[in-house]
Image (cartoon, rainbow, N blue to C red):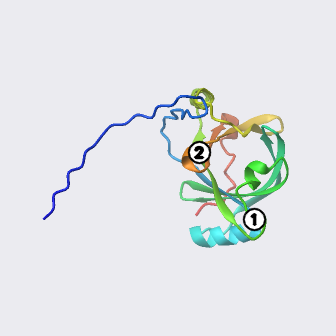
Amino acid sequence: MHTVKINHEDTALTTTTATEAIPTLAGPFGFFQIAYVTNDLEQAVRALGALYGIGRFQVNRGAQIETGAGIATAHFALAFVGEQQIELIEPAGGVDSVYREPLPVTGFAVRMHHAGRLITDAEEWDRVCSSVAAGGLATPVRGVYCHEGVPLMHYVYADTRAVLGHYLEFMYRTVAGRDIFAQVPRY
């Protein structure tokens, strides 16, 4: 019989520059959404539909997304599996490199892009945005989704790729946006 001794150490992450800083984005940190990018939305809908047991996605074409470099156009497909939202994004023009960059130039692909956290409290939204800014994380996508001039959802992508390999998206659903996902299929 062998005895193994394990030494446990508490370690703290220390950083020296803003670009190396990782902000504390304290929770609750349950992810609401897993998002993938693809270069063929229809094929991705079939593939992920089979993988996750999704019979139908809500598809939105030609969505305009505010990026730091301008407006990107993308096609989206959404569905819920339990409480988890699955999002597929196909870049479709404009300043869409934030979505196109992880994809190969040729051949079908689906790539993990971001994990999303849904926030419904304005003060918590402000805290998260302050933490992202204080940590020096780039925010290549940031905007507000409105319907008839009424803000329904604020969103920001924090560039955590150096640590996590993907972005983190924070979405603040306003009171007016409480039904924003009501038509998204659920499985």
- Residue 88, percent across and down? 69, 59
Badge 2: few (under 14), some or many (20 or more) residues near its Cα, within 10 Å? Answer: few
Image position of 25 with respect to 32: above or below = above
Provide the residue designation for mark 2.
162
Q: Amino acid at mark 1?
A: Leu
Q: Give the mark, 2 or 1, whose residue is nearer the N terminus.
A: 1
Q: Nearer the viewer, mark 2 or mark 1?
A: 2
* Left or right for 15, reference 134: left
Residue at 76%, 66% in the rendered image:
40
Residue at 15%, 62% in the rendered image:
2
- Residue 10, percent across and down? 33, 37
Q: Report the residue that reaches farthest toward the right.
A: 94
Quadrant location of residue 160? top right
Image position of 35 with respect to 19: above or below = below
Q: Callout 1: helix, strand or loop?
A: helix
Q: Amino acid at mark 2?
A: Ala
Quadrant location of residue 102? bottom right
Q: Are marks 2 and 1 in contact (CB under 8 Å)?
A: no
Residue at 53%, 28% in the rendered image:
16
Provide the residue designation for mark 1.
41
